[in-house]
Amino acid sequence: MKENFKIAWRNLWRNRRRTIITSASVFFAVFFAVIMRSYQLGSYDHMISSFIESYSGYLQVQHIKFQDDPLIDNSFSYTDSLAARISRVDKVVSVAPHIESFALVSSGTQTKGTVVLAIDPEKERKFSNPENKLVKYRITREAIDRLKGSGNIHANVLDEIEKNIGNSYSSRARLELELGLSADDNELYIPEILKACEVSNGFLTNYDEGVLVSDRLAGYLKTTIGDTIILLGQGYHGASAAGVFPVRGIIKMPVPDIDNRLIIMTIQAAQKFLDSEGMITSLSVNLTGKSHRTLNEAKNKINLLLIDGITTAKTWEELNPVLVQQIQGDSQSGMAMLALLYFIIFFGIYGTVLMMVAERTREFGVLISIGMQKRKLKKIISIEMLLLGSIGLVCGLLAGTPIILYFYYYPIILKGDLAKMMEDYGVDPMMPTAWFGPYFYWQAIIIGLMILIATIYPLRKIGKLKVIEALRS
Amino acid sequence: MKVIEIRDVHKIYDETEVAVRAVDGVTLNFDEAEFAAIVGPSGSGKTTLLNLIGGLDIPTLGEITIAGTNLRTLKSSELIDFRLHNIGFVFQSYNLIPVLSAKENVEFIMTLQKWPRKERDDRTFELLKAVGLEDRINSRPAKMSGGQQQRVAVARALASRPKFVLADEPTANLDSKSASKLLEIMEKLNHEEKITFIFSTHDARVVKMAHRVITLEDGKVVSDEVRE
């Protein structure tokens, strides 16, 4: 075996340039494939986690009619004991009751249709922790004027800040990323910028009568903390729902589509507003894993606990078929691109194999004539082919690994028009990579298959080789 | 003792409209330690006869028996194995394995035969010394002259102590000095190792040194001269 490997390895470098070119083509294909796929899957994960974990949950217990007809009439009676039983199901990390309804919101002369989400503030802390999403900093004209007035901020930094006027942030890290200042500028100016842009914000208490308004909606309504808003909707069994609610806080939702139309209040306030005492529309459940298996196992176990006949557990995929279709469609187009890339690479490898066989037919004849069995020659050629593919494959995976790792921990934050475009599509403008998974190992399988197919030709050629003809070639 | 027995061997190529009789009813015997040259004009059937003796080609008619084994009775893989253990080949254009050094080329056959490393090393050094290349053991074929490559090829052919060596025009691509040196080496090895050498050649120097000269014309043996 050692001898076979030695000959195969040396054969590989007989035509150094050709081997380098072929390996380079495999390298670039693998490198781009893992990076591209990692970004694609990372974006899906991000989209799912920003939408699902912070809003609907991986599983929801709903009235059987609620998904098709999302009215408060299709709500169900909630008890703490049900939530407790569900939270004991394997892989369940948090359970939170929600009421989801629709209402018209009005403030001053502005009116808009909104989603009203009612939460239990204590339970919600463990579920989506909306407190983390409260707006902490906002770049306003007044804040910029204060910074200009202090005379401590460099003009270039002020320009960067001005570009982001009107934007609000739920964390210092997000503000720093968005401004994109150098490390030195960050150290020098960020404390003063934070101070100037700081927003005092509040959260809901358990029996609060106030509401949280999503940042973009608050901007549209021209409302702020301490103001009041009017909600008008339809309550339980056709009752009119109307109420005046003080704004306790402004919340920045990661998904722009939700950030445009969300009002959060407590369950008690919502039940009073909608006249639906003791009722909720969903129990949202977050899990430790996201795999189909985990989801379905948890769903089945929860369904066993639902004995009232009017409620059922549904996965996020069942609840968001459009999102699932979007992801599947995008994923398939990405895979089609990769297939095209590999298709081209395959012909590169196959061309190399054809030339290699044509150049060495005589040598094959010599080796067989002096006593090398065809099966041994086939082994050497197979090892040679394997090495040819492996060099590019291993290098491609090794080169892709640090990039995937880096952007997994430090995702690209998009800015400008591209960010706006993504926001318009309802996606947080952030591009993380996906952690190493099957997509990474699949590259090895694909290259392995390509090599296997390309190896069929020389092996057949050796199998059918006539020594005399080979020696004359 | 007879090493090779050729009985009424014919090789007919009938792929073309007119069948070509490359070897036409040849009957010959070769004994141990012979140094024989097969001569004749181009197209007389020298290389074809050599290929038939070496089991690289199958006769249309007739039998070739080597050390008691009728080649016709062997399957393809058995024939390869038979060549490995019984026949050494020296080709006109050397045909060394380009990625292996002189030493590795010589020991290649022994590796295929699974010789122990120590014996392999000893035999390789002994042969490379015999062909005067003990100082080039680590050189690859591309770094050696044609004469040196052909000497490595001779060492390779003798490596596993075959019953006989077939050399197809071994001096054809060599200058006269290299050719003479190669012939001297082969004659010496023939004498020392008692291995039969059969050449096909046009080279008068080879003919001059041969102990037996077989002349072919149109695939037939027209003379078989044994010299003392």
Image (cartoon, coloured by chain):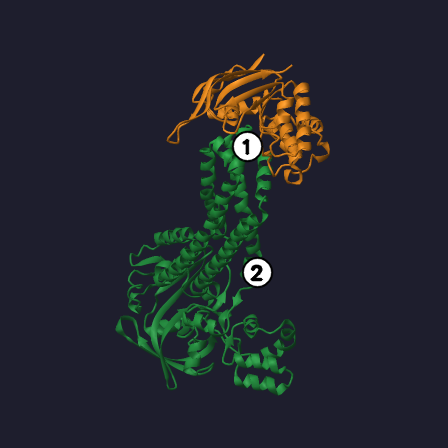
Of the pair A112 and A44, the residue shown nearer to us: A44
Q: Tell me the mark number nearer the camera, choosing from 2 and 1.
A: 1
Which secondary structure lies at badge 1? Answer: helix
Q: Colour of chain B?
A: orange
Q: Which of A145 and A384 is in front in this view?
A: A384
Q: Is residue A61 above or below residue B208?
A: below
Give the chain letter for green: A
Q: Chain under label 2?
A: A
- One can see residue A393 in this view: yes
- Residue at 61% x, 23% y is B207
User: In the rendering, which numbered label is found on residue A229?
Assistant: none
Q: Which residue is drawn at 58% across and 12% down?
A: B1
Q: Cα distance, mark 2 to mark 1?
A: 50 Å
Residue holding disc 2: A406
- Outermost residue toward the left? A238
Which is nearer the eye, A219 or A383? A383
Secondary structure category for the residue under label 2: helix
Residue A190 as seen in the image, left or right of residue A88: right
- The residue pinned by badge 1 equals A367
Label 1: chain letter? A
